[in-house]
Amino acid sequence: MPTRHSTLPDPRVWRFALVLIMAVLLTGCGVNNIPTYDEQVKSAWAQVENQYQRRADLVPNLVETVKGFARQEQETLTAVVEARAKATSIQIDAESLDDPQKMRQFEQAQQQLTGALSRLMAVSERYPELKSNQNFLALQSQLEGTENRIAVARRDYITAVERYNTEIRTFPGLLWHTILYSDMALRESFEATTENADQAPQVEFE
């Protein structure tokens, strides 16, 4: 009687097919969403820091220009210099984005600098020669543009944090967070601590 040969595939083929199917299913179920969204949060934060640093870099030239026309405004000038020093002394890396205390300190320092710059701009109204100085006008324009970029960068960061936090708190992201990414915490967002804090300060002159 002839021997029948098995027509079943090699077990290794089954295992490979199973792994392939699981990989496709996992990809479709959003298993990579959490790390992807986390990287987007970090990228958005880098833009926030870049824009705040850009503003800080404008301050020394701005102070020196105003000082040349309004030396008697020493108190205001000193306040700007001190606020800048404090703002640049607080650095938050990507691993500290889930620390609410550090985020509050950073935000408060930046708000102090915003307030000091607003007072400096108000002072300039009393000095017509300063207001017409080309160097001051250029710095003013750069500052205004930077404030607008800060507002955009903050908005993008808030959006990225909201997407990431929502993902790890809702299904199926909650499942993947529990199984694979339990070490990844909720990220801190900005809090509007002053009225219209989401809007760029008005630094232009009429």
Image (cartoon, rainbow, N blue to C red):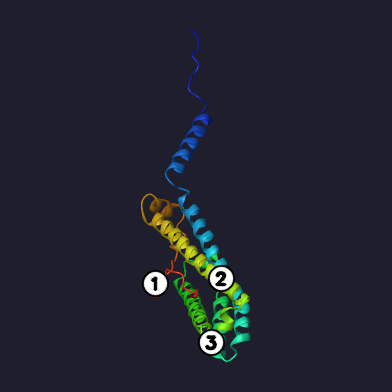
Q: Secondary structure at mark 1?
A: loop
- Name the kind of residue labelled 1 in the image: Asn
Q: Which corner quadrant of the image does residue 143 belong to? A: bottom right
Q: Position of residue 29 (x, y in %)?
A: 42, 44
The foreground one among 129 and 64 is 129
Badge 3 crowding class, 10 Å Cα cut-off, few under 14, some 14 to 19, many 20 or more, is some
Question: Between marks 2 and 3, how big is the CA–CA gap?
Answer: 20 Å
Q: Position of residue 184 (x, y in %)?
A: 47, 60
Question: Between marks 3 and 1, how big is the CA–CA gap?
Answer: 24 Å
Label at residue 141: 2
Tell me if label 2 and label 3 are in contact, CB under 8 Å.
no
Q: Earlier in the sequence, mark 2 or mark 1?
A: 2
Q: Position of residue 33 (x, y in %)?
A: 46, 50
- Name the kind of residue labelled 3 in the image: Thr
Q: Secondary structure at mark 3?
A: helix
Question: Between marks 2 and 1, how big is the CA–CA gap?
Answer: 21 Å
Label at residue 196: 1
Label at residue 76: 3
The foreground one among 41 and 169 is 41
User: Can I make out residue 56 in this image?
Assistant: no
Q: Secondary structure at mark 2?
A: helix
Instruction: Specify whether 46 is left or right of 161.
Output: right
The foreground one among 40 and 26 is 40
